[in-house]
Image: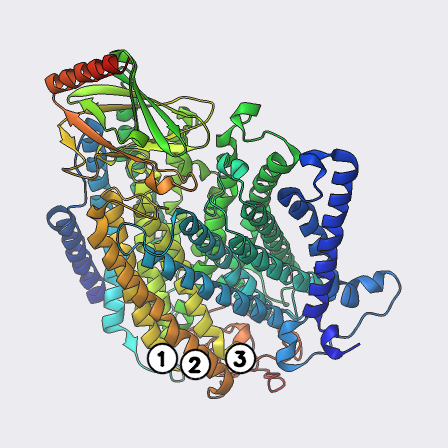
Amino acid sequence: MRRDLTLVIVLWAIVSIVSVGVAVFVMDPFPAVGAEESELIDEAFMVMTYMGAPVFAIVIAVLMIALWKWRASGPPAEGEDGPPILGTNWFPKAWLAASAVLAVVVMIYPGLTGLAELREDDTAEMRVEVTSVSWQWLINYPDHDGIRLSSGAGDEMVLPAHTRIQFDVEALDILHSFWVPAFRQKIDAVPGQTTVLYTTVTETGSYEDDVAYRIQCAELCGLNHTDMAMKVRVVERDEFDEWVAAQHASAAKVR
Amino acid sequence: MPAIARAPIVQGLIFGIVGFLIGIAGTGLVRVAFLGRDGGDWWSTDLSWTIGYPVALVGWLIGVGGWRYWGREWFGGEVDQYEMKGWQRYFGFSPDHKVIGIQYVVTFTLLFLLSGLTVMLVRYELAQSGLQLFNNDTYNAAMSFHGITMVAVAVAILAGGFGNYVLPLQIGAQDMAFPRLNALTFWLVPPVAILLVTAVLMGGWETGWSAYPPLANLQTKPGQVLFNLAVITFGLVSILGAINFLVTVIYERAPGMTWGRLPIFTWGIFAASLIAFFFTQAFAAGLAMILFDRVLGTSFFNASGGGSAILYQHVFWFYSHPAVYVMVLPAFGLILEILSHLSRKPLFAYRWAVGGMIGIVALSGVVWAHHMFTSGMQDYLHAPFLVLTELISIPTGLIFLAAIGTIWAGRLWVNVPMLFALGFLFNFLMGGITGIYLADVPTDLFLHDTYFVVAHFHYTIMGGEIFALMAATYFWFPKMTGRMYSERLGQLHFWMMFIGFQLVFLPMFDVGIKGMNRRVADFPSAYDDFNLFITLSAFFLGASFIPFTWNLVVSWIRGPKAEANPYRASTLEWQVSSPPPEHNFPEIPEVVGPPYPYGQPDVRHVPGPAGAAGAPAGGGGGGGG
């Protein structure tokens, strides 16, 4: 019994370390990091992976040792039972306490702290109006004298790098969801109300670099939900200003 | 009258069709005579189905046996005897819980295989970017059909099937508390299947299984109405079944079967029934409100009429999150049951495991909004639902404690049911840990609606509950059919299914994090490699059900005869013949001790000969095949 316990602790440690090792050195799951919030969320993801590793490992360790040491072939003979360990002692209480502590820890960090951080700043340097209608994205730049883009026309949403942006999201008909994987967060577009998402865009990037630079509808919206996407391009500030000027010029030409 | 016309299913169909015609004719008459709606057209798909179907359902229930075996009695007539024997019993109105259990298992296994074949087509479509097999429309129909049928299978097959068959035996009862209600409940299931298949044949519906309005209100496809009617009917199945289980467990336990001596599988069914009883009506109400919006012109969910789309999500998830515990609590009970018998150990921390189940029941009702972190609901709801959702890991941890404590130092007979039970532990562990990412708001804002979610819930429901279902199918196969399955084919099935399952769903976590969203027919070609790999693995996983089906069909027909107690297990269902005699026990057994008295020579669950628990006792008649 004591030897088995030692073995399980050793296995537990090994599986935990290997799991964390895999998470750190082998896994490379994240798409392009296009916003400050992306860094926060990716970090929260990894923290949970580190916390999950020993939980995963304790069950795996017991499964391994059970299959290795206590495996029997064929039906049991008369009286060939395991020891009657009923678990009526202190152990379940300790387990309960440990799992409660773990649950409380993970809900505080990275949960509630991350939530607070995402919510603490409700100011922005620029506003973008995102209107969804089956099955298109319509982008409006109210700070730049009404530049209007639409996914139906094959436009790209262009944003300036290193800028905190407030997306005001609306739906004209049914539910859609505004999501740029490079920026991580998503928010539903709800008929009859305006939902808001703040994103601090950082580096430059485009759909050609990483498909995470796209608006993707993330709420099933019927027939062409699949195709309800729009490319996103994040450019440096001066390039963005040139783009705005060009948009104004071509709009003037049309007029 | 020819014999075939007396067959319950035929009579049910005739009465059902007559009922449907009466319903739509009445609707049509009123529309033409009084309403002049749509230019006085007698037919309106939404309205005609909404009124025709309930009348058809009543006709079906009357025809299939509700009158002959039940209703006639009230009006002073003689009810028919249940005269059918052998295989024919399974096609009739039988109040025997063992017949009903097999009816559920076979019906939902067929639905499971049909839905599995559908998803093979879905995976074929997703093997590469672009559209191959489907267009956007048919893809949505196939994906939605897969979703709702698998949800129905997951809700009903363990409780309805194995709960019905095993629970009365385990508690020493002769049948369920309400046998005729039990039969009636089962016969509500075929209309559900017929409606869903008809909906697909009529072009399907677009909303997945979750039916979010306003899309569900506004889409013109008639399949949406059939879907709503089907799911409301299915909700009725769930509620009536739950009432029957609750009353049976409370009132029909054998002498000496105290709450502290209940086998853990029975506890799992009891806990799941509590949830089904309390919460199912929310889902049914939500779907009824959609029907009202469509047919009666209300505006529960239309913003333009003062309604709210988010309201539906609250109502829907208020049931649909607890529903995952309706699926999984019986699986917990089942796995602990099998681990105890096949490790030949008493269930470790039995009372804590039961406490865990009740804890899950209690918490299940207060976590629903974690499905809505991105929905635009009130911002102040995020933190409390994050906290409450994380709490549910604590009672679930007790289930895992009981599992690993039970296999500790046991004598593990690693046969097919044991393999599936251990596979369940691995898969549910993965599903549970990845659930944490979806409970914490920051990561959920990212991962919601991606393939990460798809992988997570398949790990809990398919890797969890369906693995438990397979464990149950093999474990109780000798009891239910009187024949043994092939161990070798079963092991082949397990390894194909276990490996195939990991190869399908592990990469889905990754591609989800990389930005692939769910419920799409097409995706950027950057995800091509992942999806081709997943599709090939899915075909391998699908192929694992060939040895499964072959094994069970052939073994049922001509497998070797099974002993009463092939596992030398201690609980009551193993103390009677395989299959059990007609009223289960020649005389009502007396329970004298805990359910899993392994390793304690002086302790018994039921009085029996000396030696280890589980020697056949009180045999009874030799099977009724």
Q: CA distance from mark 2 to mark 3?
A: 10 Å
Chain letter of disc 3 in the image: B
Q: Residue at x 50, y 47 (%)?
A: B205
Residue B256, horizontal then vertical, whole percent: 60, 66
Residue A130, horizontal then vertical, whole percent: 33, 24
Q: Quadrant of residue B182?
A: bottom right
Where B219 sits versus B112, above or below? above
In this rendering, the label closer to the viewer, 3 or 1: 1
The reply to whether discs 2 and 1 touch (Cβ–Cβ < 8 Å) is yes
**Which disc number belongs to residue B481?**
3
Q: CA distance from mark 3 to mark 1?
A: 17 Å
Chain letter of disc 2 in the image: B
Could you tell which of marks 3 and 1 lies nearer the N-terminus?
A: 3
Residue at the extreme right:
B76
Chain letter of disc 1 in the image: B
Identify the image quadrant of the C terminus of chain B: bottom right
Residue at the extreme front:
A254
Q: How many marks?
A: 3
Q: Residue at x 66, y 45 (%)?
A: B50
Query: Mark 2 — residue?
Result: B485
Where B380 sits versus B292, above or below? above
Query: Mark 1 — residue?
Result: B489
User: Judging from the image, what secondary structure is the residue with disc 3 in?
Assistant: helix
Asked if badge 2 and badge 3 are on a common chain, one would say yes
Q: Amino acid at mark 2?
A: Tyr
Query: Is A154 or A201 nearer to us in this picture?
Result: A154
B293 left or right of B152 in image: right
Asked if badge 2 and badge 1 are on a common chain, one would say yes
Residue A49, horizontal then vertical, whole percent: 22, 45
Q: Amino acid at mark 3?
A: Thr
User: Judging from the image, what secondary structure is the residue with disc 1 in?
Assistant: helix
